[in-house]
Image (cartoon, helix red, strand yellow):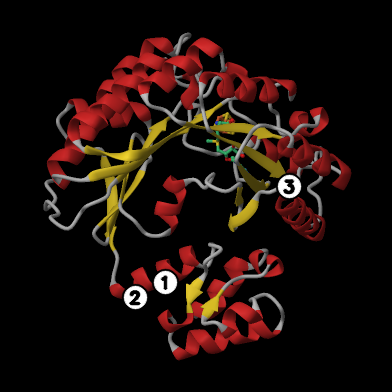
Amino acid sequence: MERPRSSATSALSFYIHIPYCSKRCGYCDFNTYTPKELGTADLALITTPYVDSAINEIELAKHQVGQAIVPTIFFGGGTPSLMPSGEIARLISSVRENFEISSEIEVTLEANPDTITEKYLSEIFAAGVNRLSMGMQSAVSHVLAALDRTHDPANVKQACEIAKRVGFKHLSVDLIYGVPGESIADWQTSYETAFSLPIDHISAYALIVETGTKLAAQVKRGELVMPSDDETAEKYLAFDGAAERAGFAWYELSNWAKPGGHCRHNIAYWNGSYWWGIGPGAHSYLNGRRWWNVKHPTTYQSAISGGQSPEANSELLSEENMRAEFIMLQIRMKEGIELARLDSRECEQAKSFRDSGHIDGEQWHSGRLVLTPSGRLIADRIVREMLV
Ligand SMILES: C[S@@+](CC[C@H](N)C(=O)[O-])C[C@H]1O[C@@H](n2cnc3c(N)ncnc32)[C@H](O)[C@@H]1O
Ligand code: SF4
């Protein structure tokens, strides 16, 4: 169980998983559980013991890593905004007590616009959360219904206004496009609505039909029809152009930001920095080793209360794995990859995508591999062909 302490670790980001949602959305296969699935009528009854376990894991991180500076903390889910503000405060305090905190720390919390009140936001802001990421998904009611989402689109605007009043400078929304029944005009309505909000960041994801979800069953039965890949690609390109015109610059495959609005936590991840994932199913990466925790909250808590590590499995990354990972992650970014980091075969493969307009010719000329908007749509294929 004991892992060697790392003397080389200077920065360590924390991802803290909150594995609860009031209801599971039809498209989602995240590692999250509803009160019904957990056999409780009230989430409040289980959150305190869960946070106790998560704090034990933060202490385990301290024991194994030693000293580190924490530049970012990200509360993801699930629905972290279901967690009482006092519990969020306890988790942040534990990171503070065990590690040095960067003076510019970014602390993000994923929030469901339905659950937000001014009192709650003031309390988590006072506890140190300084960035909110809201699950907006769409501004069109029938699209939200196809996604099986419960919130009223007007709640997002109200939640952003409350957050601004409370003092949050950094606000982000998640959008989903390529939803059954969503027209190009519906998608435009959604993103134009997002642009009108007082936010500095947008994540836009193409809907993925995950195996085993309610959505997958509806699509299989023919009740919902997924749009064609061409239409979804058209939506990506339309969004990208409109976002740039609205002042949100593209910086990662699915992310756009106004100046200063980039999510530093995700950038650390894409840059291959070290991070520790707290909670069931959370992944961690440190010194060429990747590991992940047991998936179910109950198993996680039992491991911790029995004095065991919650780790389910791990892998050591070889030099070759690390290089492949570097290419896979860096190609997603606006800065792309320095050509000098590629070997001659990878460069040759990439050249054919440059010639077909998927890789930017001018950037190539100045020594970098940067995807064009059409290249971003086939990023996975480009990586696959470069790495064969
Ligand atoms: C953990 S959730 C965000 C917070 C909160 N649980 C919510 O949904 O409002 C992360 C994001 O992943 C995206 N997502 C989840 N499942 C997806 C799927 N099947 N296809 C595309 N995006 C998905 C959604 O945009 C969602 O907002
Ligand atoms: S999309 Fe968000 S709110 Fe919906 S089930 Fe998944 S994690 Fe929960």
Q: State the SS at label 2.
A: helix
Residue type at the position of mark 3: Ala
**Pick the front one: 280 or 173:** 173
Q: In this view, does 231 lie above or below 304?
A: below
Residue 212 shows which numbered tag? none
Residue type at the position of mark 2: Glu
**Numbered disc total:** 3
User: For the residue carrying disc 1, how many other residues have a C-alpha within 10 Å: few (<14), some (14-19), or many (20+)?
Assistant: some
**The quadrant where residue 293 appears:** top left
Q: Where is residue 267 in the image (x, y as percent from the top left)?
A: 45, 53
Q: Does residue 55 appear to the left or right of 21 in the view shown?
A: left
Residue 320 shows which numbered tag? 2
**The quadrant where residue 90 appears:** top left
User: What residue sits 20% from the left and 54% below the top?
Assistant: 9
Look at mark 3 in the image and give the residue it sits on: 246
Mark 1 or 3: the one toward you: 3
Q: Does residue 142 appear to the left or right of 61 in the view shown?
A: right
Q: Are the residues flagged by discs 3 and 2 in contact, CB closer than 8 Å?
A: no
